[in-house]
Every structure is written in C-alpha cells, then in structure tokens.
Image (cartoon, grey):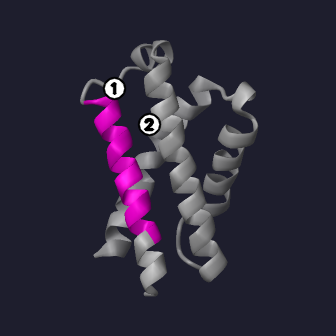
Amino acid sequence: MELKINKYLFDIQTAIDSIYEYLGENRNFNDYNENKILRRAVERELEIIGEASNRILKIDDQFPIDNARKIIDLRNWVIHGYDKVDNVIIWGVLMNHLPKLKKQVDSLLK
C-alpha cells in the first residue's frame, strides 16, 4: 500500500478515535445535541475523515473504503452546508456507520 494512503488511513483512524473520546462511554443524543462545542468538534473530525477519504480516492479511485463517496459528500455538506447540518443525521452516522468504518480502517492498517 502506498505510504500516503497509509497516512490518510491513520488520519481517519485518529479522527474516529477522537470522536469516540469526545462522546465518552455514555453516548447520548441529548447530551450531543445540547453541547455546541461537542458538535463542532465531532463535525471537524468528520471533515477530516471526508478529506482523507477524498485524498485516498485521488490516489487510487478503486481503494476499498465502503461508501467512500458518501463519506466525502458528508464532509462537503458539513463544510459548505454548515447552516443546514442536521444533528439527528450526524448522530445516525456516528451510531450506525462510524463503527463499520473504524473496523474497516483498522483492518486496512494491519
């Protein structure tokens, strides 16, 4: 695997780990929804995940990251549609899709 791709995968892994650290063990939507600093921190990590995914696909457009295009689209939505970000949708991504991405990235880095 190309060294740059490894670096971007590590960036994704670090961002995911940071999100989990921010959310803590007792992940609760109401806590997330009411804490602007927490939401902004999570959104920033999602931006990093999307940008790193984009850079990987520029190197290898067939690289095996599930839903890579959707990850990049989420990044673009958070950045460019900042005033339309829906906390419920972001929470759904965090609870339903982030664990799968973490498993995949962890596996690719081994």
The residue shown at (38%, 56%) is: 102
> Is the N terminus in the top left, top right, bottom left or bottom right quadrant?
bottom left
Occupied quadrant, residue 61: bottom right
For label 2, the residue is 95
**Is 54 left or right of 12, judged from the image as shown?**
right
| Numbered label attached to residue 107 | none
Q: Is residue 61 visible?
A: no
The residue shown at (46%, 34%) is: 41
In this picture, which residue range is highlighted in magenta? 8-24
For label 1, the residue is 27
Residue projecting furthest to the left: 25
Query: Is residue 17 in the magenta section?
Result: yes
> Is the C terminus in the top left, top right, bottom left or bottom right quadrant?
bottom left
Query: Is residue 16 in the magenta section?
Result: yes
Magenta part mainly helix, strand or loop?
helix
List x then y, in percent, for residue 104.
40, 64
Q: Secondary structure at mark 1?
A: loop
| Mark 2 burial class by Cα count in 10 Å: few <14, some 14-19, many 20+ | few
List x then y, in percent, for residue 20.
33, 39
The residue shown at (33%, 26%) is: 27
Residue 30, compared with residue 56, is above or below; it is: above
Q: Amino acid at mark 1?
A: Arg
List x then y, in percent, for residue 101.
44, 56
In front: 79, or 102? 79
The residue shown at (27%, 30%) is: 24
First in sequence, mark 1 or 2: give its number: 1
Q: Secondary structure at mark 2?
A: helix
Q: Is residue 33 visible?
A: yes
| Mark 1 burial class by Cα count in 10 Å: few <14, some 14-19, many 20+ | few
Q: Amino acid at mark 2?
A: Met
Residue projecting furthest to the bottom: 1
Residue at mark 1 to residue at mark 2: CA–CA distance: 9 Å
